[in-house]
Image: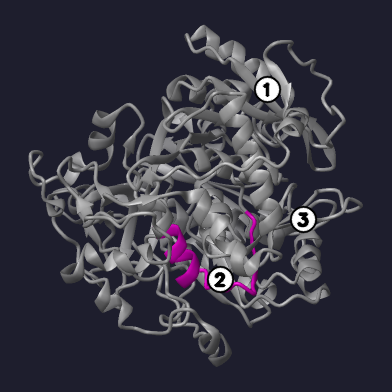
């Protein structure tokens, strides 16, 4: 009978076995300087005060005209914020800071090569360069408000300059992650109907000058096959005045930005007064599971949300030096390298290269040299730095007051290393949960108000009201020990407006599941489905367990892969772990566990057994892996994420597909060789 009951576990209810961790509290010194120390913010942003509570964020910005409607639900669930308001994102990120902070550094650009000088771009210089680029886009390219332009740029200062120049004109920018292929860029060019592509000749990665221009040629050719003609390709030069790519320029189509800009020296462009609900940019989610989705983010609502969360969650003050070690090609970079920090007059660091070049001490040298005191990165990077340089932070004199983790759940063991070693026990940590689609943070502790808890994202942000549903739409209350589908009950200004050109897909994917009335204009009838599984502790904190489909059903027990991976990381020798499901005739699915080790440790049968035992101890016998594979490294994307899909194909003896876009495709062959 017990087995039958197990087999009837709801699809959303993942077995949750791990224990809640203890609280860590911010220091009195941090609280004393924090931007937000008033616990009544949660009351001010309660559902009773929704949506007008968000005026508090919008008032952080300068508006040409105030709005008449805070939230327009007439086209639910395509919600519009601050309707009637007129605003310009470029003005808010640059111009308005000149009166008091003209000579303050806006962007610290750190080249990957350590023998190249750091470029410190003041707000005055940023204003000059954004104006001249905007003039070029308007005059030479004929771009105007509402047009789309595709950017395929790496982590150089030219990327935010180009973004802000577009925003100045009301041109919708679509930045494609620099590590993506020309074909991936072409897919986004076609979908957005861009006629202009802005790229760069080359950039550094792992000490090598990478030819980036060749991707532009592929993009244009592939887009043309799908009927989208790119008229102009604008090429920034990594070294102005010198062409660093072996790929030839195409006459009549390709132009050097650095040459064209000479014509626009001293030109100033008035920012276009844009409606608050006008699109600011498109951010495409990766197309690995079908056609890329162009998440359309609006101007006023998005900018208000990232400004507010940068101030109150990131705790950025004008005197701080803030470094988010993400890529601007992802939403984290848009929200928390460019628009959020610059809107509140921060000094933001942009680093061109990989964190471990030329060695694992590089991030901490950058932090020491620039006086960085707020550090923001992903668990992927934290795990990698913990693996290759666990003692490196101790060698450098930097002091973080605040650290962020973003992008995926962070295992408690990794969190503790981040806190004790990277943060030197001084820094508070905010473990933020959000998505491309949401524009900004959904769950996080407010650093001076709510204590930290390893492995937990914390409560909903002020104004964000999560709810966990089971498969039938029944709410799973805090402390019930069951996980389900975490949704957000209410809209918020940072959320995307729609999927570009595909409203039906937008409604179907994000709202249809739990919509109470498809004809309703009431926001209460449209909970937003995040696609993530979560459990809520008795204290109201949320623990995110990964995507709903990142679960393994073992004999009816649904085990979250993140939970299994966290258990493996309790073993001292283990640096990284990845769990994949393997088909089993009896149990349906069983977990295979892949691990890589910290420096100085060697694979052995004894270590495999020790790791397997840790899963049994932490979770139970049901979690025992079929096999523990100790591998030299994990197959990873260019952005550092472990490709579990590839590992799953290896374990299930299936075709691994195209692995040429991985950062380390050779590791796939090495792992396959171990299986024989």
The quarter in which the N terminus is drawn is: bottom left
Q: As rendered, which of 437 and 420 lies closer to the eye?
A: 437
Q: Are marks 1 and 2 in contact (CB under 8 Å)?
A: no
Q: Answer yes or no: is residue 631 visible.
A: no
Mark in front: 3 vs 2: 2
Mark closer to the observer (1, 2): 2
Q: Which residue is mark 1?
A: 215
Which residues lie in the magenta part?
305-325
Q: Nearer the viewer, residue 644 or 170?
A: 170
Query: Is 420 located above or below residue 278 in the figure?
Result: below
Do labels 3 and 2 touch, CB within 8 Å? no
Using the image, tell me which numbered label, if any, was put on residue 602.
3
Image coordinates of residue 284 in percent, x first then y, are 46, 35
Report, in whole angstroms, how far the alpha carbon at label 3 lies from the one at label 1: 40 Å
Q: Earlier in the sequence, mark 1 or mark 2?
A: 1
Q: Earlier in the sequence, mark 3 or mark 1?
A: 1
Q: Quick one: label 3, few (<14), some, or many (20+) residues within 10 Å?
A: few
Q: Secondary structure at mark 3?
A: loop
Give the residue number, with chain letter if any, for mark 2: 316
Q: Is residue 431 magenta?
A: no
Residue 8 place in picture, x, y as percent: 18, 48
Residue 345's x, y, as percent?
58, 64
- C-alpha gap between disc 3 and disc 2: 43 Å
Q: Is residue 365 above or below residue 469?
A: below
- Looking at the rendered structure, the secondary structure element under dot 2 is loop
């Amino acid at each position: 009978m017990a087995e039958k009951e197990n087999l009837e576990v709801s699809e959303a209810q993942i077995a949750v076995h791990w224990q809640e961790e203890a609280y860590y509290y911010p220091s009195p010194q941090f609280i004393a300087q924090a931007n937000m120390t008033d616990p009544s913010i949660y009351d001010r942003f309660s559902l009773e005060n929704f949506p007008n509570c968000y005026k508090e964020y919008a008032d952080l910005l300068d508006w040409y005209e105030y709005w008449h409607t805070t939230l327009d639900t007439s086209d639910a669930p395509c919600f519009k914020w601050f309707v009637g308001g007129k605003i310009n994102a470029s003005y808010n990120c640059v111009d308005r800071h000149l009166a008091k902070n003209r000579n303050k550094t806006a962007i610290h650009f750190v080249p990957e090569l350590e023998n190249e000088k750091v470029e410190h771009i003041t707000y005055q210089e940023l204003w000059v360069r954004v104006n001249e680029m905007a003039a070029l886009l308007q005059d030479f390219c004929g771009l105007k408000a509402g047009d789309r332009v595709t950017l395929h740029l790496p982590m150089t200062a030219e990327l935010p300059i180009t973004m802000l120049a577009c925003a100045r004109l009301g041109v919708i920018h679509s930045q494609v992650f620099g590590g993506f292929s020309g074909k991936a860029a072409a897919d986004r060019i076609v979908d957005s109907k861009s006629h202009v592509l802005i790229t760069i000749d080359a950039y550094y990665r792992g000490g090598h000058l990478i030819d980036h221009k060749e991707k532009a040629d592929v993009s244009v050719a592939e887009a043309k096959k799908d009927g989208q003609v790119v008229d102009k390709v604008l090429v920034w030069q990594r070294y102005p005045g010198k062409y660093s790519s072996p790929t030839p320029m195409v006459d009549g189509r390709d132009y050097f930005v650095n040459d064209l800009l000479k014509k626009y020296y001293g030109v100033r462009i008035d920012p276009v007064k844009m409606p608050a609900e006008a699109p600011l940019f498109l951010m495409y989610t990766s197309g690995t599971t079908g056609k890329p989705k162009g998440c359309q983010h609006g101007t006023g609502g998005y900018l208000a949300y990232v400004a507010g969360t940068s101030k109150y969650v990131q705790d950025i003050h004008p005197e701080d030096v803030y470094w988010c070690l993400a890529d601007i090609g992802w939403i984290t970079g848009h929200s928390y390298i460019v628009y959020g920090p610059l809107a509140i007059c921060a000094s933001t660091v942009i680093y061109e290269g990989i964190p471990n070049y030329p060695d694992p001490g590089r991030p901490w040298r950058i932090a020491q040299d620039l006086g960085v005191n707020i550090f923001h990165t992903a668990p992927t990077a934290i795990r990698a730095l913990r693996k290759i340089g666990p003692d490196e932070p101790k060698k450098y004199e930097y002091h973080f007051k605040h650290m962020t983790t973003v992008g995926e759940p962070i295992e408690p063991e990794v969190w503790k290393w981040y806190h004790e070693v990277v943060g030197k026990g001084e820094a508070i940590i905010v473990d933020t949960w959000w998505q491309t689609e949401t524009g900004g943070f959904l769950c996080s502790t407010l650093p001076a108000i709510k204590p930290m808890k390893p492995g937990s994202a914390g409560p909903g942000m002020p104004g964000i009201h999560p709810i966990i549903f089971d498969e039938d739409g029944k709410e799973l209350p805090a402390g019930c020990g069951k996980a389900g589908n975490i949704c957000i009950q209410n809209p918020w200004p940072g959320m995307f407006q729609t999927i570009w050109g595909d409203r039906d897909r937008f409604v179907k994917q994000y709202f249809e599941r739990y919509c109470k009335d498809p004809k309703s204009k009431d926001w209460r009838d449209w909970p937003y489905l995040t696609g993530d599984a979560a459990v809520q502790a008795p204290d109201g904190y949320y623990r995110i367990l990964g995507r709903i489909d990142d679960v393994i059903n073992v004999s009816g027990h649904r085990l979250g892969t993140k939970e299994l991976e966290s258990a493996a990381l309790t073993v001292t020798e283990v640096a990284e772990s990845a769990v994949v499901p393997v088909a089993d005739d009896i149990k349906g699915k069983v977990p295979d566990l892949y691990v890589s080790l910290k420096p100085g440790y060697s694979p052995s049968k004894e270590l495999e057994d020790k790791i397997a035992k840790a899963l049994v101890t932490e979770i139970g016998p049901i979690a025992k892996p079929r096999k523990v594979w100790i591998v030299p490294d994990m197959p990873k994307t260019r952005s550092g994420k472990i490709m579990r899909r590839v590992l799953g194909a290896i374990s299930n003896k299936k075709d691994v597909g195209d692995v040429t876009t991985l950062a380390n495709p050779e590791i796939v062959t090495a792992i396959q060789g171990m299986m024989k």
